[in-house]
Image (cartoon, grey):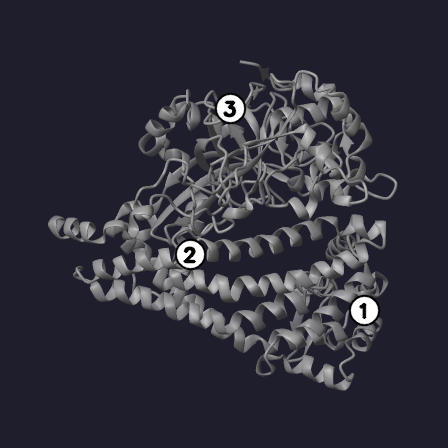
Amino acid sequence: MKKTLLVFALMLGMTWQSFSAVLPDEGMWLPMFVKRLNYKDMKAKGLQLTPEELYSINHSSLKDAIIGLSNNEKPRGFFCTGEIVSDQGLVFTNHHCGFDAVQNHSSLEHDYLKDGFWAYNKGEELENEKLTASVLIRMENVTDSILPYLSDTMSFSERKEIIGKISDRIEKRNSENGKFNPVIKGFYDDNEFYMFVYKVYKDVRLVGAPPSAIGKFGGDTDNWMWPRHTGDFTVFRIYTAPDGSPATYSPKNIPLKPKHFLPISKKERKKNDFAMIWGFPGSTDRYKTSFGVDYNIHDFGPTIVDVLGKKLEVYDRHMNADPEVRIKYASKKASTSNSWKYFIGQIRGLKRLHVSDKKRAIEKAYLQWAKTQKDADKYIEALDDIETGYKNLSSTVRPLYFARLGLTSPELFDFVNVFYQHLAPYIEKSSKGKKYFTAIPEEAKKEIETTIDEILGEYDMALDKDLLKSMLEYYMQSIDASEVVPEVLAIYQKNNGDFEKFVEKLYAKSMFASKEKMMSFLEHPSYKKLKKDPAIKFQNAINQSIGATMVRYRAGIQVLENGKHVYIRGLRRMDPKLVPYPNANSTLRMTYGSILDYYPADAKHYDFVTHGYGILEKEDNSNPEFVVPPKLHDLLVSKDFGSYANSDGTLPVCFLTNNDITGGNSGSPTINGKGELMGLAFDGNWEAMSGDIAFEPNLQRTIVVDIRYVLFIIDKYAGAHNLIDELDIRTE
């Protein structure tokens, strides 16, 4: 067998060479394996810490300074990363990670999005009711407790059910009666399993945020682009009960005393300096097949771009006309715009870098290898299943996502969902089969009202109406007649193509367009009245009509996932170098590399650093994306940079590394070889938007806001010297 594989590898030659030699800067590595897999390479590139100083479950280590941000008390994943930077629980993360918290505290009277927010003492710090910060206590390989109970003859659903039951038992046993939050996740398409045990802190307060003109400088125009001049940071603080345990908000709580926090480096950055990033990358699909790449290029990506693009048109129309709407929808628009531009870039990158062709080369080699195996049929069928699965998805994705992301995206239907979610326990069925409501407790009514108020705090009915009307019109223009939901077609025909009439009537008659009507219903609930509400009837019609589409879609997923489970195992057996690290899945990872420039195209070169004078070059106060606050303008013009300038007198703003990150890494610390914070990772670059599927070492870069620019804004712009005094700032 060894001889066969050697001859086979030589025969392939250059066919997969670019895939088999993984560069040190590629990879999202599990920290528990750092000593065995990565330490020698990291040390050669400039790391000065020991493996135990990076990851230890018995002693303080770098991992203890990394937090995952969530809006859940028991999170199974994280929307962003942050890092503890003081012995008083101070946390740095990105501006766009804290954007929702800042928006929730903003109003026309106190527009913190526009003006920024700074707490000059701990008493001014602001509570964030749902925000949590999780610190990893330990990770553990539990593969042997799960994998023996699985088999390739199981369907995807059967396999997931067994994994879920076993995982629940293990997690419950390791929670220590709720003290910890254990989370088990599958790796390599459920061929390995690891448990992550977290301590979840529930009192996370807003401490500081620059105005959006700094924290989001460049807006959508500069998003995913380099050169960048964005001060993308927000400051929080974690609080605990007086005994140091996690606790919900209380005036008696005290700042966290962390096991470890990151000191800060003011040392000047140089090309090829060592850089590592720790955080919680959300999702990658590096081992996707050519069938999946083609699906993203031709089906999934264009669908998402079309739907989100239409939403953005509606957002812009109303946000530009009303400052209050601008505040209410700021976070929604930012999130939507980010995803919209991401998929545009991904499609472009996948095409430009010929990723499908590279994947096909691997698949050709895989099939040749599979034919040499005793269980050849199983491995060959796995690739066939993947192809079949994507064909099913391709035929369903457009009508499905236009309906789910478009037709039911207005928040009118969020109110409907709130009622269904909270009232389901109080629905009974009579002996004759008729449904009715039992008495609804006052506590349940209060929960519903609280949720309604949360939605209303970021809601504008005029925008919501326009969104539904626009989505209905776009849906009719974009979906093949055979796939159009019958209810929508009937509405179109009844109103002679004028959806505005339907929308106005819907909002006028539905109780879900009025808080007063919703609360009145709770006092005299009627299941019959609920089912007759026009908003519920419309939503149910949409959901029922796409049921057949969902059956086809789920069937595709089942076949696809079964194929991937075996295909990935086969790739690892064929050549482990083809699958050197697991895909991201919102678990703690480490990536390492260097500060580095790049060449985006022929005859073009991008330096690895941007400067304060670049902000002035981009300044355009007639364009809201490039407004420079007067105080910042004056500081830049006068070159009043304090101690945060380079040796040549310039102010550093952002820099590049070749680290391997993705969504969820936002806010991740970029750390030097001594374990000191150099900056906060906040974006990738446009030329490598296909990076979640195929890492491109010559192009892929991480955009980092330099910690010296962060300190400059906190110190010289905001005058928050109280925060500077907390930090361990090092110059050497």
The reply to whether callout 1 and callout 2 are in contact (CB within 8 Å) is no
Residue nearest the viewer, comparing 200 with 568: 568
Residue toward you, 211 or 586:
211
Residue type beneath disc 2 = His
Q: CA distance from mark 3 to mark 2?
A: 33 Å
x 71%, y 65%: residue: 413
Q: Is residue 120 visible?
A: no
The residue carrying pointer 1 sits among few (fewer than 14), some (14 to 19) or many (20 or more) residues within 10 Å by Cα, namely: many
Marks 1 and 3, how far apart in space?
Answer: 61 Å
Amino acid identity at mark 1: Met
Q: Amino acid at mark 3?
A: Lys
Query: Residue at horizontal 75%, vertical 57%?
Result: 315
Left or right for 559, reference 653: left
Residue contact between numbered discs 1 and 3, judged by CB atoms under 8 Å: no
| Relative side of 547 to 693, left or right | right
In the picture of the structure, the residue carrying the numbered disc 3 is: 270
Percent coordinates x, y for residue 443 in the rendering: 74, 54
| Residue at image mark 2 | 354
Question: x, y (%) of residue 20?
Answer: 30, 45
Please, which residue is most extreme toward the front here? 603
Mark 3 / mark 2, whichever is N-terminal: 3
Q: Which residue is mark 1?
A: 511
Front label number (1 vs 2): 2
Rounded to the nearest angstrom, the CA distance separating label 1 from label 2 is 52 Å
